[in-house]
Image (spheres, rainbow, N blue to C red):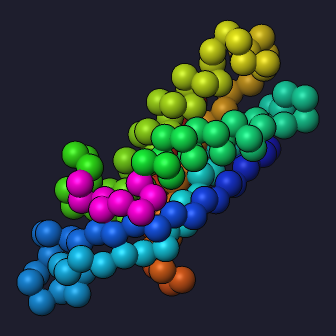
């Protein structure tokens, strides 16, 4: 049995896909109202929680949303071809690093219980439109 948390965030960003055919509509600069969803799980709870939603929010808002919102995604070194798939993988990598830095810091309130609980990032979802969603399944311990 696993408990899974999902936390979603909105951002606006522009992009173009340089590797598609010239006739493809996504070759041209355009924007999306993205929804990013982070799925985290654990088999054990600390104080009745997998983790505090505010910790997820702090990391995502600080190092992902505040960086990408209202920007051209192609301007970022790892996103020269910013497909939903590449954006999801990049956001997962950023989240894993930054969440570990926050959550496993000795000053974090739950630090003492870390050895009792294993949290993992299950997936990151990137939704570009109402009908277009990429789910990047990570399944990596945080």
Q: Is residue 92 magenta?
A: no
Identify the residue at image location x=64%, y=39%: 58
**In the image, 24: left or right of 32?**
left
Q: Is residue 128 left or right of residue 14?
A: right
Question: At 80% across and 31% down in the image, what residue appears?
Answer: 44
Give coordinates of residue 32: x percent, y percent: 42, 75
Q: Position of residue 102 (x, y in %)?
A: 61, 25
Q: Residue at x 85, y 27 (%)?
A: 46
Q: Relative to 34, does residue 51 appear above or below in the rendering?
A: above
104 or 141: nearer the viewer: 104
Report whether residue 63 is seen.
yes
Q: Quadrant of the C terminus?
A: top right
From the viewer's perspective, tell me whether residue 22 is left or right of residue 142: left
State the extent of the magenta-drawn residues as a range: 68-75
The number of callouts visible is 0
Q: Please say if 102 is above or below 79.
A: above
Residue at 34% x, 69% y is 14
63 and 140: which is toward the camera? 63
Residue 61: image x %, image y %?
57, 47
* Extreme-left residue of the structure: 22
Q: Quadrant of the N terminus?
A: top right
Instruction: Please state the horizontal and vertical placement of residue 25, each as a whole percent of the image.
Output: 23, 87
Horizontal side, residue 69 vs residue 7: left or right: left
């Amino acid at each position: 049995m696993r408990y899974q948390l999902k936390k979603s965030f909105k951002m606006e960003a522009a992009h173009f896909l340089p590797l598609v055919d010239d006739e493809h509509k996504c070759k041209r600069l355009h924007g999306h109202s993205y929804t990013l969803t982070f799925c985290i799980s654990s088999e054990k709870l600390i104080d009745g929680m997998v983790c505090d939603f505010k910790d997820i929010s702090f990391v995502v808002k600080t190092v992902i949303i505040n960086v990408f919102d209202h920007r051209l995604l192609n301007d970022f070194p790892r996103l020269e071809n910013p497909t939903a798939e590449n954006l999801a993988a990049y956001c997962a990598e950023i989240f894993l690093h930054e969440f570990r830095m926050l959550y496993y810091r000795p000053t974090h309130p739950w630090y003492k219980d870390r050895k009792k609980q294993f949290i993992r990032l299950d997936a990151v979802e990137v939704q570009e439109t109402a009908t277009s969603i990429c789910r990047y399944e990570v399944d990596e311990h945080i």
